[in-house]
Image (spheres, rainbow, N blue to C red):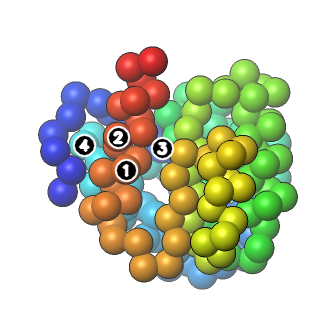
Amino acid sequence: MPPASPISALVRVHNQATSAHRSLVRSRLTLSLLPSPDVDIGPLFQTPEEVARQAIDADVHVVGVSTQAAGHKTLIPALIEQLKKQGAEDALVVCGGVIPPQDYEFLHNIGVSSVFGPGTKIPIAAREVLANIEKQLTK
């Protein structure tokens, strides 16, 4: 379990493409290891514009995207663009799912703070998300 932290994070998890329910449950479990988190799972099949609007309306720190249908090179860049366009460029974006390791650099270069592939250990992912939130909040 991550070390205690004074941060209370608000995280929204979205599944922008078809994938198993298990990945969303895993995302929620991962993020629930954060100290005092408020984790919200958004509706399935939202557009990047809708996800950005919902994230802004909820004043989130992190938007987590689960993708398993090769949408990571189109949907995630569009989401980041919408977050910036709508004034939420400080919201972190994390993603997970079946994403080829060779695409991780692309995602990091467009602004994704963390990418979690299949087999990622939950405590490791939780620590990384928490570290990224702490870093963002202390800028």
Badge 3 amino acid: Val
Callout 3 crowding tier (Cα within 10 Å): few <14, some 14–19, many ≥20 = many
Pointer 2 residue: 131
Q: Position of residue 136 (x, y in %)?
A: 46, 28
Callout 2 crowding tier (Cα within 10 Å): few <14, some 14–19, many ≥20 = some
Q: Where is residue 3 in the image (x, y as percent from the top left)?
A: 16, 45
> What residue sits 75% from the left and 77% below the top?
69
Report the number of discs.
4
Q: Are marks 4 and 1 in contact (CB under 8 Å)?
A: no
Where 7 falls versus 3 (above or below)? Answer: above
Where 16 falls versus 5 (above or below)? Answer: below
Q: Are marks 3 and 1 in contact (CB under 8 Å)?
A: no
The reply to whether residue 87 is visible in this rendering is yes
Marks 3 and 1, how far apart at CA: 14 Å
SS at mark 3? strand
Pointer 4 residue: 35
Q: Which mark is residue 47?
A: none
SS at mark 4? loop
Pointer 1 residue: 128
Q: Where is residue 74 in the image (x, y as percent from the top left)?
A: 84, 58
Pointer 3 residue: 11
- Counting residues from the start of the chain, the first of labels 3 and 4 encountered is 3
Badge 1 amino acid: Glu
Closer to the eye: label 2 or 3: 2
- Counting residues from the start of the chain, the first of labels 4 and 1 encountered is 4
Marks 4 and 1, how far apart at CA: 13 Å
> What residue sits 30% from the left and 51% below the top?
127
Q: Are marks 2 and 1 in contact (CB under 8 Å)?
A: yes
Q: Where is residue 110 in the image (x, y as percent from the top left)?
A: 72, 44
Where 107 falls versus 52 (above or below)? Answer: below
SS at mark 1? helix
Quadrant the C terminus occupies: top left
